Image: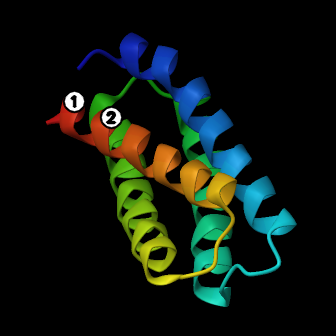
Amino acid sequence: MQVSRIKQQFPQIEQSIHQAVQACQNDQSVSQELKSSVQQLDSECRQAHAVLQQSQDESRIRQTIEPMEATADRAKQACQGAGNLQPQTKSAVMQAHDQLSQLKHQLH
């Protein structure tokens, strides 16, 4: 996948992650596991943003995005294990996961 296409898609992923962060902050029923996974994902997103600004190296970009997808997997699992989440919280986490998963598959 071309670096330019990754850079085009990444702002949507960033927005989804930010929505998941906000949803988790606003939902009192969020587990600590889910909250920490989403916060870690947000931190990794900021790092990936910096790499995308500085680098044209697809390999380096891939190495930055793959851990994000693994973190999104943990957030998805925590989300599925939580019984009483608000629908918008679950939706936001799942959307961030799905977008990262799709990007990772496009990288391979």
Query: Percent x, y for residue 17?
Result: 63, 47
* Image vertical order of residue 60 relative to residue 31, above or below: above
Residue farthest bottom in this picture: 32
- Near mark 2 (Cα within 10 A), the count class, few <14, some 14-19 or many ≥20, is many
Q: Which residue is disc 1 drawn over?
A: 106
Residue type highlighted by circle 1: Gln
Query: Percent x, y for residue 74?
Result: 42, 73
* Image vertical order of residue 72 relative to residue 51, above or below: below
Query: Percent x, y for residue 1?
Result: 23, 20
Query: Percent x, y for residue 55?
Result: 48, 28
* Image vertical order of residue 28 relative to residue 51, above or below: below
Figure quadrant of residue 108: top left
Q: Which of 28 and 75 is in front in this view?
A: 28
- Near mark 1 (Cα within 10 A), the count class, few <14, some 14-19 or many ≥20, is few
Left or right position of 69 against 45:
left
Provide the secondary structure element on which disc 2 rests: helix
Q: Which of 44 and 34 is in front in this view?
A: 34
Q: How is the image coloured?
A: rainbow
Residue farthest left in this picture: 108
